[in-house]
Amino acid sequence: MASTEEFVIDYFIDLGADVTHKLVYKFPIPKLYDFHREESRDVKVVVLRATTF
């Protein structure tokens, strides 16, 4: 999730990796349970590519 982006980037840096690519998009989560009120909800996510050299 996008809310953890800085934590994950810092984690990769601590491992000696570099984040080379970042993709941000909305991921739709459908209604799965009867107690869910909305038919679907978009969650902001971040996909990171990390490499070591």
Image: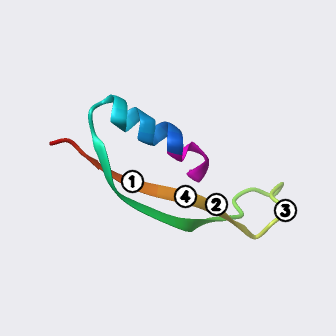
Question: Callout 2: helix, strand or loop?
Answer: strand
**Mark in front: 2 vs 3:** 2
Question: Callout 1: helix, strand or loop?
Answer: strand
**Mark in front: 2 vs 1:** 1
When the figure is inspected, residue 52 is found, relative to residue 2, above or below; the finding is: above
- Mark with earlier residue (1, 3): 3
Separation of disc 4 and disc 2 at Cα? 6 Å
Number of numbered discs overlaid on the protein picture: 4
- Residue 39 place in picture, x, y as percent: 76, 70
Mark 2: few/some/many CA within 10 Å (<14, 14-19, 20+)? few
Q: Label 2 amino acid?
A: Val
- Residue 43 place in picture, x, y as percent: 64, 60
- Mark with earlier residue (4, 3): 3
- Colouring method of the image: rainbow
Q: Label 1 amino acid?
A: Leu
Give the number of the disc on residue 43.
2
Q: Please name the residue shown 41% across and 33% down the image.
A: 11
Which region of the structure is painted magenta? 1-5
Give the number of the disc on residue 37.
3
Q: Please name the residue shown 72% across and 63% down the image.
A: 31
